[in-house]
Image (cartoon, helix red, strand yellow):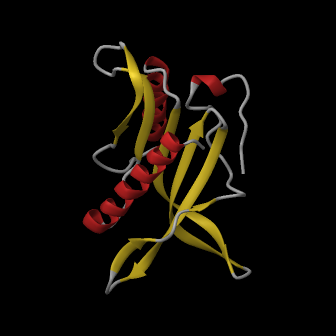
Amino acid sequence: MQHDERALVRQAYEQARQDLAQKGRVHPAAYMLVQKNPQTGAKLTHPTAIGTQPDKPFAAQADYDEFLAALREEAKRLDALAVAFCAEAMAEVEDKGTISRRRVVMIRIEDGEGIGHLHALVEGDALSGPRLGQLVTSHEAIDDETAPLLPLHAASTVIRA
């Protein structure tokens, strides 16, 4: 993951932290590092980061699929170099040899090096409210997204640890 791609991950993490503080849950969001102007389609001098976030969590699988299809189209149209997708989920997390289902924020980053996964536990209690834990690499993440978000991965997908 390059410097600019790490900025996408930091933006996704910060937005998730703000969502938790303001709404009590994380709304899905996507950030892209693009080479074309979103309004004109003209080539940019330097890659630029852009982001999008639905107003509410997805109500159904069809809503999620539609969002990802639109994201793929935009990534192709804007000649994206990287895409970071962030969402809240329930995941099996191992802690001190014990596996339990926990509320997490997952970030899937796709760039020229392949696909990576990170997660942060949603921590806190009723008194302190939810807060986001440290972002760590998900070495054994299962990628349920079968189609890549970037056109450059359409031929072969590499999952990096």
Residue 74, placed above or below residue 6 = above
Task: Return the residue nearer the eye: 139 or 33.
Answer: 33
Q: Residue at x 71, y 45 (%)?
A: 160
Question: Whole-percent x and y of residue 53?
Answer: 33, 43
Relative side of 15 to 153, left or right: left
Question: Whole-percent x and y of residue 44?
Answer: 38, 19
Q: Quadrant of residue 156?
A: top right
Q: Residue at x 52, y 51 (%)?
A: 107
Q: How many marks?
A: 0
Q: Residue at x 41, y 80 (%)?
A: 124
Residue found farthest to the left: 22
Relative side of 109 to 63, left or right: right
Residue 160, placed above or below residue 155 = below
Question: Whole-percent x and y of residue 54?
Answer: 32, 43
Residue found farthest to the bottom: 127
Task: Return the residue nearer the eye: 116 or 61.
Answer: 116
Question: Whole-percent x and y of residue 20?
Answer: 34, 65
Relative side of 64 to 22, left or right: right
Task: Return the residue nearer the eye: 22 or 133.
Answer: 133
Q: Residue at x 65, y 59 (%)?
A: 138
Q: Quadrant of residue 74?
A: top left
Where is the N terminus found, in terms of image quarters?
A: top right
Q: Quadrant of residue 19?
A: bottom left
